[in-house]
Amino acid sequence: MTGGAAQRRRVVVIGVGNTYRRDDGIGQEVLSRLRARAADDTADDTADGNPDDTADGNPDDTADGNPDDTADGNPDDTVQLVTSDGEPASLVEAWTGASLAVVVDAVLAAAPGPPAPGRLHRIVLYRPDPVPARPVSSHGLGLGEAVRLGVALGRMPDRLIIHAVEAADVGHGPGLSPAVAAAAGPLTAAVLRDLRAG
Amino acid sequence: MTHRGTHLGDRTLAAAGLARVEGEGGMYVRVSDGRVEEVRLDIYEPPRFFEAFLAGRSYTEPPDITARICGICPVAYQTSACWAIEAACGVTLPEPLAGLRRLLYCGEWISSHALHIYMLHAPDFLGYPGAVELARDHREVVERGLSLRRAANALMEAIGGRSVHPVNVRVGGFYRVPSAGELAPVAEQLARALDLALETVRWVAGFDFPDFRCDHELLALRQPGSYPIEAGTLVSSRGLEFTAADFERHVIEEQVPHSTALHARLAGHGGSYLTGPLARYSLNSQWLPPAAAAAAADAGLGPVCRNPFQSIVVRAVETVCAIEEALRLVRAYRQPASPFAEAAPRAGTGHGVSEAPRGVLYHRYELDSAGIVRSARIIPPTSQNQAAIQDDLRGFVQDRLAFDDERLTRECEQAVRNYDPCISCATHFLRLRVDRGR
């Protein structure tokens, strides 16, 4: 909520995933932590009448898409927090026109070698042209398709940072596995570092 | 992955991935002595998990929880859940809340149909492997689809709080309702979207459609006087008429060994049936609003459409319909004093149906006197259509056995996409196996 900043950059954080597919909920968990931080930072953060809905421990419930959410305390930026199911066209819409887009998602396997649930991967794409190495998202269609579509439409952010977390469990049900839950804090901190670095 | 057997008339086609289908699952086709012996659509479906998960929860929770079943049609899940729980509580949704529920649902139809038409289905007709390749050659076409979705998302955000998994829906209405002023800019976007939707109908009507007809019984909702979207009673092409409360007396679900999804059939009518755009249109085309009716006529659709390949035209016509309806509802909207009708819990069972973009979506909840869900039942459209899709594929493959494996596999994929199956609604893998050997 900077009001009047002439050259405001648009920054978006996109949490991809389904909170009822175990570790696939990590993207929403990070958004929830960013919202909580923004609420702490912004005394005038008013509720919208929606009592933050489900009582199932699901953090995926506050209305977002609100461009007034400031997640990083940096008054020069407007940080938009977006919930996504990973559908490529929606991802492209979410990051269109952004100077920086940060995507957080779970992956089933992101690197050669044995799986390491909770391991973090950070991939940076500057105005990407070729197809990037594609994380094997639990959404299948996933980020690779979204990047290819964004490139084809000329709708990529200036910089795209992907934070991928190796998942232990994407079966049905709420709640993160211990390894991925333990990664939520460091991952949120890593996203905040990216936001501060701009 | 495909294999050709040494025997010319025997083959088993196996492909390990059907792209551009919302969900996960697989397809298997076995041919022996020149005859299609077996067609299986393997579906892995999450509602069973959600049914178990809902037991023991408060009656206020299903609209939010079931919205997570599907990223493409959360409003459908919320709406069927609300109808069912409101019925159990003995609550009738008053105007303008009922209109607002239909308005939100229009947003989901526009968004889902635009996604399927532009990103998933049109590439089949234009010879592209996918939307990315289509966008490279025809950027303006894909942008048109994205503009339609943008208008839909603006509508869903204005009413639902956000477009993905809307958070503003509750039993009895909404947590908050928009002012008429808040909907005014949405109406402007919708007015522009109407032109894009009409253009979409003209565009898809020009595609080349294989000559194919399905003769399944058709099942859809009906709301005399208007096209069925968020509510209605059930009717079929063979004269069945029943309410949501009788759904499970007419629709029988059976376990099949190759799938975690149950197969549905109509009791006493012997076999598979079809729900979704073709059924809705064929049973309700007389109720289309004026622009949609004119677009359908111009596109050459008669009052009934039984060619699954033309479902893309029907979806385009329904997109026009949803935008027209949304504009009408926005114009008529007056902000109510209360955003919801009180729904006090009571012991009982409630049933709810609505027309998800892919077809009839049924929910049933049994509540105790404290409003705790004792049992839940969810029957999504894709599991209802599964047997019909398999039947169609059997005939489709039989008529195309002269094609090589690659072409046959590709056309089978296209035939599956005609139905826009939402196979798991939570992840997006579909594995296709097409076996041509012994």
Image (spheres, coloured by chain):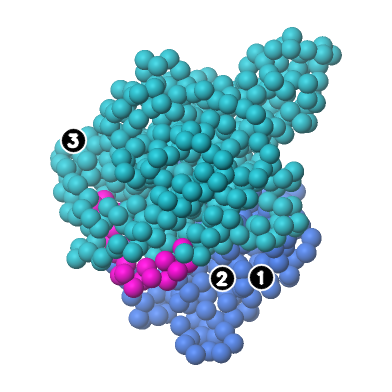
Residue that mark 1 sits on: A157
For the point 72% across and 57% down, the residue is B138
Q: Residue at x 67, y 67 (%)?
A: A155
In this rendering, the answer to whether B352 lies above or below A57 is: above
Amino acid of disc 2: Val
Q: Is residue B221 visible?
A: yes
Question: Which residue is the site of mark 2?
Answer: A12
Chain bearing mark 2:
A
Label 1: how many Cα within 10 Å (few below 14, some 14–19, many 20+): many
> In the image, which residues are magenta?
B167-190
Do marks 3 and 1 share a subunit?
no
Q: Nearer the viewer, residue B306 or A33?
A: B306
User: Do residues under tags 3 and 2 come within 8 Å of each other at their CB atoms?
Assistant: no
Residue at 29%, 67% (x, y): give it.
A49
Q: Nearer the viewer, residue B374 or B225?
A: B225
Which chain corresponds to the colour blue? Answer: A
Q: Could you tell me which secondary element the residue under label 2 belongs to?
A: strand
**Mark 1 touches mark 2? (CB < 8 Å):** yes
* Kind of residue at badge 1: Pro
Which color has been applied to chain B in this rendered view?
cyan
Image quadrant of residue B218? top left
- On-image quarter of the C terminus of chain A: bottom right
The spot of residue A169 in percent (x, y) is: 55, 44
Badge 3 is on which residue?
B348
